[in-house]
Amino acid sequence: MYQFEKMNKGLLGSQVEDALFSYILNKPVEIGEKIPNEFELAERFGVGRSTVREAVKGLVSRGILEVRRGSGTYVVSTSTLEEDPLGLSKFQDKYKLALELFDVRLMLEPEIAVLACEYAKEQEMAQLKTLCDEVEQLYLAGKNHIKKDVEFHTCIARCSKNRVVEILIPVINSAVTTFANLTHRTLMNETIESHRAITQAILERDAVGAKCAMVMHLTYNRQMIMKLLKEQQETDR
């Protein structure tokens, strides 16, 4: 049971919002799973149901929860503000956002991979290989791979030695997180294979190979988003 100091309703709602987010992370409630109902949460946190509704509404606005009428409230993301520096979680249509982020990634990441082939130092290539292996190990073990996936793409961006690309890293990171939260683990094999191909090409300083491998990696993502979007549209009919 959580205990909260007596305070005005607005601040209490904020406290319960933080406590609910901690509960989601620590239990954990996986992305795609439903959280307990309003009555259960009110009992768990020792507050009124109106306070729980306010907390849920706050997490919905942050893109953490999604209320599905007649079904319940589901976790759709576990990204904190630190992981979402651009504030993209405020966009309600995650599929549209994912496609728009894909457009940006396609403009940037294949060319970033080309630059990485030219400018990556030996120690950076060793780090990239390690990250590639770690993402694969987490995937195969059924563990959360998203943080390492972000580190993998960040490493490639930093290998480009382009200062503007450094500034744009949060865009790439937000895109990776958005895709992973929507597709869950459905692209495990494709991700592992394309990550290996990208890494091997950069290790061999094969610019054309790295560019093609990155395009293929992004294409897998787009195909899955389009599939999920179509399924969502059919469900909403």
Image (cartoon, grey):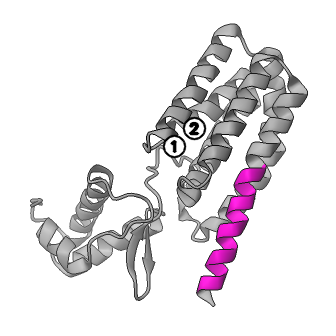
Q: Magenta segment: does it hold 201? A: no
Amino acid under disc 1: Ile
Residue designated by label 1:
146
Q: Which residues are magenta?
A: 219-235
- The picture places residue 117, in percent across and down from the top left corner, at 81, 20
Mark-to-mark CA distance, 2 and 1: 6 Å
Q: Main secondary structure of the magenta part?
A: helix
Q: Nearer the viewer, residue 15 or 159?
A: 159
- The picture places residue 186, in percent across and down from the top left corner, at 58, 55
Whether residue 184 sits left or right of residue 93 in the image: it is: left
Q: Secondary structure at mark 2?
A: helix
Whether residue 155 sits left or right of residue 1 in the image: it is: right
Q: Is residue 98 visible?
A: yes
Q: Where residue 150 is drawn, which disc sits there?
A: 2
Q: Are circles 2 and 1 on residues that touch, CB within 8 Å?
A: yes
Q: Where residue 194 is drawn, which disc sits there?
A: none
Q: Residue at x 57, y 38 (%)?
A: 149
Q: Is residue 160 visible?
A: no
In this rendering, the answer to whether 152 lies above or below 73 is above
Of the 4 image quadrants, the one containing the N terminus is bottom left
Q: Residue at x 80, y 44 (%)?
A: 216
